[in-house]
């Protein structure tokens, strides 16, 4: 009897002791033996990712600003978690942004939106390059010029709706308006069917609220196990709402493109282009003779489409919103831009300028490029895996 009791106690204590020894050895490795141990930074950040997740998940994504303070204290290269260095050095920025060599994505960030089939969620450098090269030709200047009628017609719809707000005196949510504009253009280019978001009341405010909640769920998921988001996405709605209220909105990213992708798969015929009036990204991908079959499977294409439509709407609207605010807040800059535009649009009855005409306006091109660079730097830190067993380097825009 005593022997059995002793055996039971040993069986209970063994996992506890093993866990304690593992935790202690991991702490010693991360604080003293890791290749990153020599770099400055908070010891708690070097010990556990919980330091970072506290600022992101609890303090509403404030780690970016905390990192800025840490740079002021520790210098241009700091350790921000057990696996990453953060570099805030203009002389090193171009090297980190170089396309030379192989740079795998960080699994911690790649899995957060549960879309491993998309370019955004692809970890391996070679596979990511193959997927990126498949869609890159669609964003050449020649392709965009061909899409100009679609873009212009959507701009006209946006302007008409803005005029309605001016006449009514109602406040206008520019961010949502720009999101609708960008999402409708991207959807038309991807599937030859606009989502019609511009035509919805209040610039689809409820729709974008769902998107924002889904985005927050994805951002939090980077600090959870890689299986978390796929399991949550596959669970019934009431379970998602219980586990993570924001996660119940996560599937909106893929739900918006599921129908268009499946309908496009049924349009594999030669006269699709004539009916659509322009080339579309996913019709070309689905019918590609270059891509292997596994790259054209429905689930993979849906994930790629979700990432493209989501990212296209978010990034474009963010740039346009910030640029509009900057011009309103700086009347001298707005005046200079209006004077430049006046050279090709003397009055309101002037023909709408073409994209090629607008590209010849140096001040317009410059402020758009500068704003794009600034907004891109504030999205999310891009982490490059230099060596999967040693270092991840996270780049930051200089200044």
Image (tube, rainbow, N blue to C red):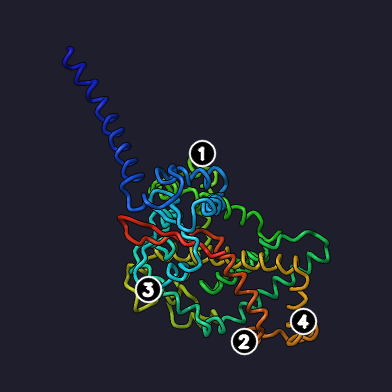
**Residue 261 location in percent, x, y?**
47, 67
**Residue 259 location in percent, x, y?**
50, 63
Comes first in the chain, label 1 or label 2: 1
Residue drawn 47% across the image and 62% down it: 395
Disc 1 vs disc 4: which is toward the camera? 4
Crowding near the residue tagged with mark 3, few <14, some 14–19, many ≥20 C-alpha atoms within 10 Å? few
SS class, disc 2: helix
Disc 1 vs disc 2: which is toward the camera? 2
- Determine if residue 233 is in view: no
Crowding near the residue tagged with mark 1, few <14, some 14–19, many ≥20 C-alpha atoms within 10 Å? few
Comes first in the chain, label 4 or label 3: 3
Work out which quarter of the rendered image holds the N terminus and state it: top left
Comes first in the chain, label 4 or label 2: 4
SS class, disc 3: loop
- Which numbered circle lies on residue 339? 4
Can you identify the residue that label 2 sits on? Answer: 356
Relative side of 351 to 65, left or right: right
Disc 2 vs disc 3: which is toward the camera? 3
Q: Between marks 4 and 2, how big is the CA–CA gap?
A: 18 Å
Q: Between marks 1 and 3, how big is the CA–CA gap?
A: 45 Å
Quick check: 182 above or below 52? below
Can you identify the residue that label 3 sits on? Answer: 100
Quick check: 54 above or below 209? above
Residue drawn 47% across the image and 67% down it: 93
Relative side of 300 to 272, left or right: left
**Residue 107 location in percent, x, y?**
38, 55
Can you identify the residue that label 1 sits on? Answer: 242
Residue 199 occupies quadrant: bottom right
Disc 4 vs disc 2: which is toward the camera? 4
Q: Between marks 4 and 3, how big is the CA–CA gap?
A: 42 Å
Q: Between marks 1 and 2, how big is the CA–CA gap?
A: 52 Å
């Amino acid at each position: 009897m005593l022997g059995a009791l002793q055996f039971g106690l040993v069986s209970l204590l063994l996992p506890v002791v093993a866990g304690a020894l593992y935790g202690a050895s991991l702490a010693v490795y991360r604080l003293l033996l890791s290749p990153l141990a020599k770099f400055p930074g908070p010891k708690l950040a070097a010990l556990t990712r919980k330091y970072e997740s506290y600022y992101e998940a609890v303090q509403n994504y404030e780690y970016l600003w905390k990192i800025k303070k840490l740079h002021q204290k520790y210098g241009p290269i700091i350790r921000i978690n057990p696996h990453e260095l953060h570099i805030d050095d203009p002389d090193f920025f171009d090297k980190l942004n170089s396309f030379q060599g192989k740079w795998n994505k960080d699994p911690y960030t790649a899995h957060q939106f549960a879309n491993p089939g998309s370019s955004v969620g692809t970890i391996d450098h070679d596979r990511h390059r193959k997927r990126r090269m498949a869609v890159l030709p669609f964003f050449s200047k020649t392709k965009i010029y061909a899409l100009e009628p679609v873009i212009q017609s959507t701009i006209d719809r946006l302007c008409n709706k803005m005029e309605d707000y001016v006449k009514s005196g109602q406040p206008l949510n520019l961010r949502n308006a720009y999101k609708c504009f960008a999402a409708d253009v991207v959807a038309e280019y991807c599937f030859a069917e606009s989502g019609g978001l511009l035509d919805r009341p209040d610039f689809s405010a409820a729709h974008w609220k769902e998107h924002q909640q889904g985005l927050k769920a994805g951002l939090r998921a980077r600090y959870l196990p890689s299986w978390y988001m796929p399991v949550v996405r596959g669970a019934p709605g009431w379970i998602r709402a219980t586990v993570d209220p924001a996660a119940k909105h996560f599937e909106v990213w893929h739900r918006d493109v599921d129908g268009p992708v499946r309908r496009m798969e049924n349009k594999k015929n030669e006269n699709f282009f004539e009916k659509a009036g322009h080339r579309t990204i996913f019709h070309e991908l689905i019918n590609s003779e270059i891509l292997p079959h596994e790259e054209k499977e429905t689930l993979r294409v849906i994930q790629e489409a979700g990432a493209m439509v989501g990212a296209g709407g978010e990034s474009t609207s963010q740039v346009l919103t910030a640029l509009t605010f900057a011009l309103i807040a700086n009347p001298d800059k707005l005046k200079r831009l209006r004077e430049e535009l006046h050279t090709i649009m003397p009055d309101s009855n002037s023909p709408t300028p073409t994209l090629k005409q607008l590209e010849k306006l140096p001040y317009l091109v410059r402020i758009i490029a500068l704003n794009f660079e600034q907004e891109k730097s504030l999205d999310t830190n891009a982490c490059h895996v230099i060596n999967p067993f040693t270092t991840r380097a996270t780049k930051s825009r200089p200044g």
